[in-house]
Image (cartoon, rainbow, N blue to C red):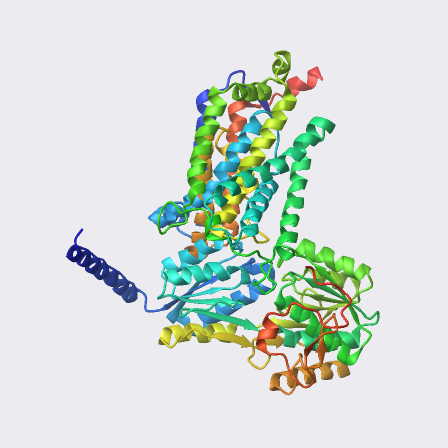
Amino acid sequence: MVRLEPRRQHSQAMVYLSPVLAILMTLVVGGIIFAFMGKNPFDALYTFFILPINNSYGISELFVKATPLVIIGVGLAMGFRANVWNIGAEGQLTMGAIFGGGLALYFHDSESILLMPAMFVLGALGGAFWGAIPALLRTRFNANEILTSLMLTYVATLFLSFLVHGPWRNPEGFNFPESRPFPDAGLLPIIFEGSRVHLGTAVAVLVVIAGWLLLSKSVIGFQLRVVGKAPQAARHVGFRQKRMVWFTLLLGGALAGLAGLFEVAGPIGQLQPSISPGYGFTAIIVAFLGRLHPVGILFGGLIMALTYLGGELAQITLGLPNAVTGLFQGILLFFLLACDVLTKYRIRFGSIAAKGRTA
Amino acid sequence: MNASLVKRTLAAVAAVGALATGMGAAQAEDVKVGFVYVGPIGDHGWSYRHDIGRQAIEAELGDAATTSYVESVPEGADAERVIRQMAQTGHDLIFTTSFGYMNPTEKVAKQFPDVKFEHATGYKRADNLSTYAARFYEGRYVAGVIAGKMTKSNVVGYVGSFPIPEVVRGINSFMMGAWSVNPDVEVKVVWANTWYDPGKEGDAAKALIDQGADIMVQHTDSPAPLQVAENRGVLGFGQASDMIKFAPKAQLTAIVDNWDSYYVARAKAVADGTWESQDTWGGIDSGMVEMAPYTNMPDDVKALAEETAAKISSGEFHPFTGPIYDQAGELRIAEGEVADDGMLLGMDWYVQGIDAELPK
């Protein structure tokens, strides 16, 4: 029999090395799978991981794709550190897009430079509002936030669907389910001419820095870490856990809402029934890939974004199916979790007999 | 920088560009055709049929053409990048096969004037951007005639995707076909709000059958509603492709999308250099809309269906022939007239007699 035994001490270096190891093993296994599919594994891996970013346009697209993942991931990581499991970032993203995007639709003739800042505020508020509901349910009724936040995601996407099919439908759009295009004043400025890299990408970098400062330098960051790692001790010294629930869900919601606003005011430019291919869920993987550390999340977001771009190019140039993207993301997550387990536990063989006697 | 330097720089850039395109042409004499699909090619419906059309190009043009595709591309921020990647990787002709790709296709088409684009079911065109679609409402009228004859409960269940003109037009056409042989038929519509989600589509079908429907019609892409019909012992119609193997006892016929000859013709046009931007809306006569074999029905119904399809194909009959009133009782198409394409393309009203409300 095989069993896992907790390590008394786990190597700090391995905590940071395990994502790297996981990526390397993903490459090896991915190469083997490509070989089985009759493709040259080196060509295929090159197409998947290098070709998408071997020109400036590709790199710019990588930033565009990583922007929402990083912003949401940083927000989620704060909660995960304090054992607050917000799984509903996708819904908070959607509400941010509705609130902020709704403003752009209301002022669709506006040329005011105040429109964009106001959209930022409303986008963050929309997401925070959607995060506040699970926070209230958890602190008041002790309802599990995993369930409530996840289920609110469906409410949010259906609400968006209702709006673009009904009251917010483009009057000149032949009854198609989409809003008017946002006015120019409601579109994020492009940072690099000729690309789709928008102001939101710069905000993502700021979010990473702010998140890092918050975690490492602030009192509340310290409280987050203690509440997560040693809840008993935290109670003992008087850290209020309810406050942590509120803080992390509001912050995570606000950042997800901002990310949603950036999608609709950036690359999409209007509201439509589907505005995110599951960024809110992918960001959970990103947060763990980045070791719940804002700088790590920046890299994690870029790697996840790369798997999407690589999957598209693998389809175009190699004729591989779309499932290859999900496959790579799955293998990566599997190896990451496996590495984490082996960092914290060691494998013991053949000790079942000894255990049997004590039982 | 002074003016002459600018000119010289521009000339150098142009020369390099010409060299690059020249090299590209020398390497690849063949036409490179790309497809962007909204669903997986295994949906057995919409995207599947487009992919059959892609394979027809390969079969017909042989070495003269290479094709590629990207499946399950979300109709959001990702579409623009995928379309652009295709344009950048040397594709000469790119088909974007869902309505939601309209704005990104238009945007990329502007940036790549030498690449030809074709967008299915949209209305924005440019010098290098064509649109194409098929008059599926013709097939739906034929299906309606069959349903009117075959229903016993006089309730038809209709799984809709989105209340867009394409789908509303289909419901209207189907019901007018049904009433032409049986004025007592009523329709119940469930909006699945998706093009492809077998679970949701199947649930909608179950709910409709529970409400007494004994004919299942769908405007979503998976065979799920028809499979539910098969399991529950009622009849139904296949969507986009012949789905008889999913429902050997239930399928009456299917409205089959046949893009093969269109795709082959357009790829050849690019190869010959005769491609021009145009708007194509083909019906039964063009071969774009096909009726799968009529099954699970008596011979007289089959004969009636064949006759109806033949009349529509020859132009002798148009499904939208007046007088047609909308639900509010307003005369939309006058006696003896037929709907023009503009009205059909923007149709956002139900014909009188449909006892349901369009989602507003």
Residue A337 position (above or below residue A306): above
The residue at the far right in this view is B153
Residue B50 visible in image: yes
The percent coordinates of residue A275 (x first, y second) are 55, 49
The percent coordinates of residue A240 (x first, y second) are 63, 19
| Residue displayed at 42% across by 35% down | A205
Q: Quadrant of residue B181?
A: bottom right
Image quadrant containing the C terminus of chain B: bottom right
In-front residue for pair A35/B97: B97
| Residue displayed at 42% across by 38% down | A202
Q: Is residue A182 left or right of residue B295?
A: left
Residue A336 visible in image: no
Q: Is residue B91 left or right of residue A220?
A: left
In-front residue for pair B197/B230: B197
The residue at the far top in this view is A237
Q: Is residue B334 left or right of residue A123?
A: right
The percent coordinates of residue A264 (x first, y second) are 52, 48
Residue A201 position (above or below residue B352): above
| Residue displayed at 47% across by 58% down | B104
Mark count: 0
In-front residue for pair B2/B106: B2
